[in-house]
Amino acid sequence: MSRVDGRAPDQLRNVKIHRDFIPSAPGSVLFEWGNTRVIVTATVEDRVPPFLVNTGRGWLSAEYGMLPGSTDRRKPRDGRRGGNVDGRTVEIQRLIGRTFRNLVKLDKLGPRTIWLDCDVIQADGGTRTASITASYLALYDCLRRLRERKVLKHDVLLGGVSAVSVGVVEGKALLDLCYEEDSRADADFNFVMTHEGKIIEIQGGSEQRPLSKEKFDECYALAEKGVHQLQSLQNTALIAGS
């Protein structure tokens, strides 16, 4: 099969990274991944949730949202209808928070919270994977600046992370699905992996029929390749801006 945008099965969409996109935030990124665009800011709050008060530990949390004009049809803002946030939004921001709590030494952060705010300004598939991949860059810059200002004495970041989608469309495993491919996939997955290749989380499943282990292994191999490519792009961006 030929892909809608002409890519090879194992090819990522084009990625563009713009660091320090929001000058008022200690860490910020405009992340363009194909036609998906996400702005991530990393900010610091000098307090922690009630269950961490007087423990000396810090916290990291995330919020995620899709702006009204990010899709073909206007998406109502979360919270406008009776204060409710839709389940998909809650799921994604919990995923982002879990991901980075794996990678930050919260006991060394001190009594403060790092917030990762991910705002999708244009959606064409992979918004959660783009948010995670971009959040690493914003968090890296935020923590670096805290060290430069002597707020933190030590590096509290344990490593890097990237995330990528893989799906099975018409029986073919494809890396990094755009929306059109995702909407007709027989199975789709989101892989969140460290730069060392360790798994933080895999989300996904089959939409039409059970997936064989062989086909899942093919998807996993594509994800490993995609994460490695994203790691290279992240590192290049960090080196260029250092």
Image (cartoon, rainbow, N blue to C red):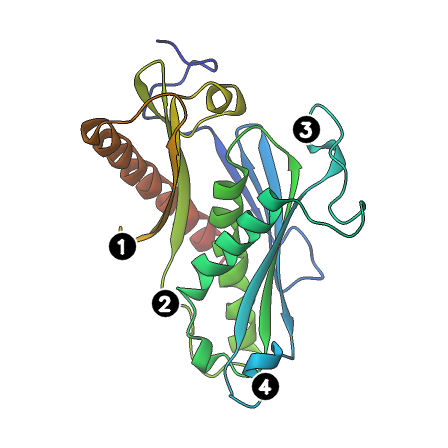
Say whether disc 3 or disc 2 marks the residue closer to the N-terminus. 3
Residue 201: x, y in percent? 37, 50
Q: Nearer the viewer, mark 4 or mark 1?
A: 4
Q: Nearer the viewer, mark 3 or mark 1?
A: 3
| 3D distance between C-alphas at marks 3 and 4 | 40 Å
| 3D distance between C-alphas at marks 3 and 1 | 34 Å
| 3D distance between C-alphas at marks 4 and 1 | 33 Å
Q: Nearer the viewer, mark 2 or mark 4?
A: 4
Q: Along the horizontal axis of the image, is 102 left or right of 39?
A: left
Q: Residue furthest bottom?
A: 54
The residue indicated by pointer 1 is: 196
**Disc 2 element:** loop
Q: Residues within 10 Å of mark 2 (few under 14, many from 20)?
A: few
Q: Which mark is residue 71?
A: 3
**Disc 3 element:** loop
Say whether disc 3 or disc 4 marks the residue closer to the N-terminus. 4
Which quarter of the figure has residue 75? top right
Residue 195: x, y in percent? 32, 53
Q: Which mark is residue 158?
A: 2
Total label count? 4
Q: Residues within 10 Å of mark 1 (few under 14, many from 20)?
A: few
